[in-house]
Image: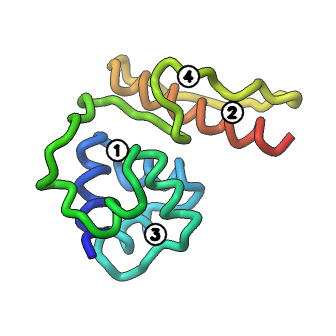
Amino acid sequence: MYFAKNLRFLRRRAELSQSELADQLATDYNTISRYENGKSTPKLEALTKLSQVFHVSLDALRSQDLSQSPGPALEPGRVQTGGRREGEALAKPAKHPLLVSVELDGTATSLERAVARLTAINEVVAGTT
């Protein structure tokens, strides 16, 4: 089983902190830390979401050493959420307004992460209306 090693590898390759990945999974960074250290195993729902976030199959996530696998490299700083690939339409806007505060540090990476988080929030809210 390579899950813990793969999760750490994929998260770092995507330049995500444990907190940022946890936000995408609607959990906390301690849970991500336990997954990466092999102290906890995610349920199927979390595994499915992780496979969508990182665009890998469930089988590959669990049973292949992805750090040794050839494949398309993720662009540094590129964050993709909710299984949405570049060029796909965003979820429909929510019918109810939601106030979200975003802090940026002036870097492109900061902006990309903010957009990814806002997109994820929009997808969650749009899916519940």
| Rendered location of residue 118, percent (x, y) | 59, 31
| Rendered location of residue 54, percent (x, y) | 39, 46
Q: Amino acid at mark 2?
A: Asn
Q: Which residue is mark 4?
A: 88
* In-front residue for pair 32/63: 63
Q: Which residue is mark 2?
A: 122
Are discs 2 and 1 less than 8 Å apart at CB?
A: no
- Disc tally is 4
Label 3: which secondary element: helix
Q: Which residue is mark 3?
A: 31
**Which is more N-terminal, label 2 or label 4?**
4
Q: Amino acid at mark 1?
A: Leu
Q: Which mark is residue 16?
A: 1
3D distance between C-alphas at marks 2 and 1: 20 Å
Q: Is residue 120 left or right of residue 20?
A: right
Question: Would you identify the image quadrant in which residue 80 lies?
Answer: top left
3D distance between C-alphas at marks 4 and 2: 14 Å
Asked if residue 30 is positioned above or below residue 93 in the image, the reply reads below
3D distance between C-alphas at marks 1 and 3: 15 Å
Are discs 4 and 2 less than 8 Å apart at CB?
A: no
3D distance between C-alphas at marks 1 and 4: 22 Å
**Which is more N-terminal, label 3 or label 1?**
1
* In-front residue for pair 80/28: 80
Label 2: which secondary element: helix
Q: Residues within 10 Å of mark 3 (few under 14, many from 20)?
A: some
* In-front residue for pair 53/70: 70
Label 4: which secondary element: loop
Residue found 75% across the figure and 25% down from its top: 92
